[in-house]
Amino acid sequence: MSKHAARQFILARSVLGLAAAVLLALVGWIAFRSGGSAEPGDPLLVLPTADLQAVEGSLPASSPATESSPVSSAPSPSPSPSVSRSASASPSASASLSPSPSRSPSTSAKPSPSKSTGRPSPSPSRTSSSPAAADLSVTYSTSASWRDGFIAALRVTNNGTSARDWTVTLSYPSGSGIELRGAWNATASISGNTVTLRGKSLAGGSSVSVGFQAEKDRNDLVKPVTCAIGGGSCRVS
């Protein structure tokens, strides 16, 4: 070996030895800094780095997160502000949606009352027509009777306050053979076995006596089976 090569070897060896000494001193200083706060006699916890675990493959991938949690207890205040900001943003979004449902009920209430107020007025006009009062009344009686004839007497009364025209209709049994011979205080007509008497302008609160004479085919007393007066009642005695 030449002298030049021997010098280079010695120089390289000395440089490597110096580097090894510096590395050992650095390792010792790091160990002293990491374990300086521990009490004498306490066990020293040395955590493997994530790179060594990935290379060796002896621990699962989730183990560094669980073991590094006690070491990272000091920088715990850092995640707290991030959570408070995200929570404050959520109510602002919910508050912006609140005024939207207030618009819908305001539009549905206007057109309904305008339709129901217009048309109930014609209903009372139909009920205003009251039926005519039963102001007239009449009573019928037989004043005389013989074998082939009789005399009928009627009294017509106006119980109202104004003058009224009146019509009395008398229906006799079939087979009576009624024939008129005369009438007074009324206009008389006959159709079959029905006799009709009419009068005009009977003053209110007054009455009139009317009658007629007729022939008959029966020997017994003949009376009308029905008696009617327009706007009143009729009674046969």
Image: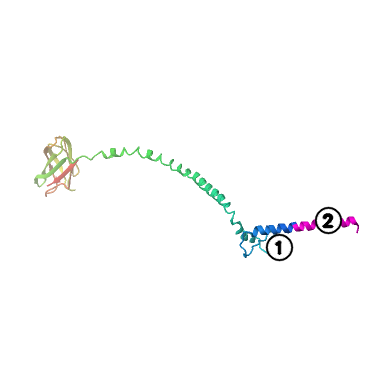
29 shown above or below 195: below
Q: Position of residue 128 (x, y in %)?
A: 26, 38
Residue 56: image quadrant is bottom right
161 shown above or below 27: above
Number of disc labels? 2
Residue 108 or 29: which is nearer the viewer? Answer: 29
Q: Secondary structure at mark 1?
A: helix
- Quarter occupied by the N terminus: bottom right
- Residue drawn 86% across the image and 55% down it: 8
Specify the segment rendered in magenta: 1-21
237 shown above or below 10: above
Q: Is there any visible trace of residue 52 in the rendered image?
A: yes
Identified by mark 2, the residue type is Leu
95 shown above or below 3: above
Q: Is residue 92 magenta?
A: no
Crowd tier of the residue under label 1, counting other residues whose Cα lies within 10 Å: few below 14, some 14–19, many 20 or above: few
Identified by mark 1, the residue type is Glu
Q: Is there any visible trace of residue 49 in the rendered image?
A: no
**Which circle, 2 or 1, is nearer the viewer?**
2
- Residue wearing tag 2: 11
- Residue drawn 13% across the image and 44% down it: 140
- Residue wearing tag 1: 56
